[in-house]
Image (tube, coloured by chain):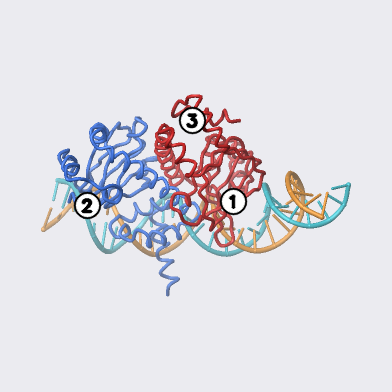
Chain colours: A blue, B red, C cyan, D orange
Amino acid sequence: MQDILFDFIAKYISLTDDERNALLSLDLFRSVKKGTILLKEGQKSKDVYFILKGCIRKYYIINGEEKTTDFYTEMEGLTPHCVTNNAPSEYFISCVEDTILTVANPDIGVEINAKFPKFDIMCRMLSEELLAKEQINFDEFKTSSPEQRYLNLVQKRPDLIQRVPQHQLASFLGIKPQSLSRLRARILEKKS
Amino acid sequence: MQDILFDFIAKYISLTDDERNALLSLDLFRSVKKGTILLKEGQKSKDVYFILKGCIRKYYIINGEEKTTDFYTEMEGLTPHCVTNNAPSEYFISCVEDTILTVANPDIGVEINAKFPKFDIMCRMLSEELLAKEQINFDEFKTSSPEQRYLNLVQKRPDLIQRVPQHQLASFLGIKPQSLSRLRARILEKKS
DNA sequence: TTTATTTCTTAACTTAAGTGAACGATTTAT
DNA sequence: ATAAATCGTTCACTTAAGTTAAGAAATAAA
């Protein structure tokens, strides 16, 4: 399981065995059941996550209604906003499936970074890469209709459509579950 | 004018006079006329921008139609995607107003960074801050209706509504100019 | 200044998403 | 195993955005 973490890191920096062991000794791995809420609105957490297996979801509750804005799956990391700005969280994070992930907080991070400056370099690369991706994603979202966004998702993250409840997917696409059902029926209609 | 740049930098790091002079000696400042296109789709540029005065705009042309996805005004910086991924640009950048900005490319950057590691620290802070902002913005966009997005914009960037053409604003909000007109009429209606 | 072009708004009509409700299917809890 | 809750889809209806077109206003060009 930890291989997934090391494979991920290898995309950015190369580690010695010592470094690998230092990482493992931190005991970052957690196994969490489907439905578990990792972070609640209002909470002040410092935990950052990296998914090894499974799927977690970020959502707001606005006027009593869940609004899902992101899914994170294998090989994806998430630093909640509250970690960065040291304020209560605006959103929830919960597990869509039984999930194995690493949970780290900057206190641990300082320790690692002091020992291995490499990690700092990786974090910087990551943050820049994520920013670029996020901007492109945002642009795509803005310039597309719900139908195009759905078709785009089918292309780019086909697994999500299988593993995530439809009403959460709908919310993620910026529409209601009924609209997603209808939209899919419409697409099938067109194909025939 | 350069004070704006130094004020911005001062938010992240403090500079010595030497460092300030080194920056100025690079001659990064440019004055560009309204309508000037700084970056075209397909172009491979390495230039990054920082706005001192004025407003620039990022837009795609999709099916012959302009889709504006971002505006950058005073004290905001922009690193086009093509700079990061070394590929032809997917979008255009043009000046909404007569604009004064700095234009730098990483070649210059390497020089500065070698001399003053501080800049590296600032870049990292910036990139992390921008990522956080971008994520919050994206979430807000996803969880709002066009009308809410417009009202939100009135709160957060009231200047944009004045200085930017309506059809570009509409596109930025993810709707057509006619819908923006209607939506504004609807809001006025409600108030009375 | 006059002309041409672009921009903004309004209107009528079309299309798609929101809403409320119903129903079966699935999942979860007891 | 059964009851309860959640979920996905369909339907009819409402509301808002897309589309096409036209005209007024503002801007830029000649």
Q: Is residue A48 above or below residue C6?
A: above
Q: Amino acid at mark 3?
A: Ile
Q: Which residue is mark 1?
A: B179
> Residue C9 location in percent, x, y?
67, 47
B25 or C9, which is in the foreground? B25
The reply to whether label 2 and label 3 mark residues of one chain is no
> Residue A44 location in percent, x, y?
30, 31
| Mark pair 1, 3: CA separation | 40 Å
Q: Which residue is mark 2?
A: A4
Which secondary structure lies at badge 3?
helix
Question: Disc 1 sits on a residue from what chain?
Answer: B
Mark 2: few, some, or many residues within 10 Å (few <14, many ≥20)?
A: some
> Residue B64 location in percent, x, y?
59, 61
Q: Which residue is mark 3?
A: B9
Quadrant containing the C terminus of chain A is bottom left
Q: Is residue A51 left or right of residue A172?
A: left
- Whether residues under marks 1 and 2 lie with C-beta atoms below 8 angstroms apart, the answer is no
Identify the residue at image location x=48%, y=44%: B107
Identify the residue at image location x=54%, y=34%: B75
The reply to whether label 1 and label 3 mark residues of one chain is yes
Q: Amino acid at mark 2?
A: Ile
| Mark pair 1, 2: CA separation | 48 Å
Q: Which mark is residue A190?
A: none
Q: Is residue B43 above or below residue A61?
A: below
* Residue A80 quadrant: top left
Question: Disc 3 sits on a residue from what chain?
Answer: B
Which secondary structure lies at badge 2?
helix
Which secondary structure lies at badge 1?
helix
Mark 3: few, some, or many residues within 10 Å (few <14, many ≥20)?
A: some
